[in-house]
Amino acid sequence: MIDFNYSATPKDTEDTPYVPINKVADYFQVSISTVRKWVNNDYIPDDTYIKIGEVYRFRLHDVESALSKVTKSGQAEH
């Protein structure tokens, strides 16, 4: 039986929920196509998001950490 009253605890989401690509774009004040470019160029590594079909969900904290590393090394492009 499915429990529809289930709510995720921080342990279940590892303290950070997954957000859609438009939330990532809004957070970094860039276009959705820029976020896709970052994914395709591996500026946003595979372990920071999940992809089901054509739908991406990102962990903002992990994306921010990854982009900070890329920015420090001077590789990021907008």
Image (cartoon, rainbow, N blue to C red):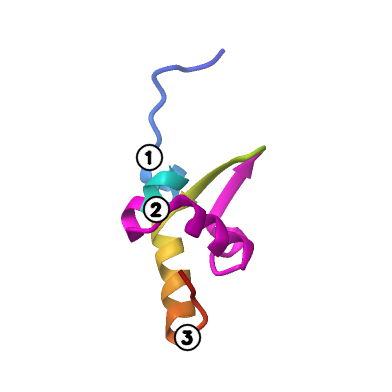
Give the residue type at disc 2.
Ala
Q: Is residue 8 left or right of residue 39?
A: left
Q: Nearer the viewer, mark 1 or mark 2?
A: 2
Q: Residue at x 48, y 87 (%)?
A: 73
Q: Which element is circle 1 on?
A: loop
Instruction: Give yes or no for residue 3 being in the magenta stretch.
Output: no
Give the residue type at disc 3.
Gly
- Residue 58 x/y as whole percent: 48, 50
Q: Residues within 10 Å of mark 1 (few under 14, many from 20)?
A: few
Residue at label 1?
9
Residue 61 picture quarter: bottom left
Instruction: Give yes or no for residue 42 being in the magenta stretch.
Output: yes
Up-down relation of residue 47 to residue 72 (above or below): above
Residue at label 3?
74
- Residue 72 x/y as whole percent: 43, 85
Q: Residue at x 51, y 54 (%)?
A: 33
Residue span colored magenta: 26-52
Residue closer to the observer: 66 or 25 = 25
**Mark 2 and mark 3: Cα distance apart in space:** 20 Å
- Residue 39 x/y as whole percent: 58, 60
Q: Residue at x 56, y 12 (%)?
A: 1
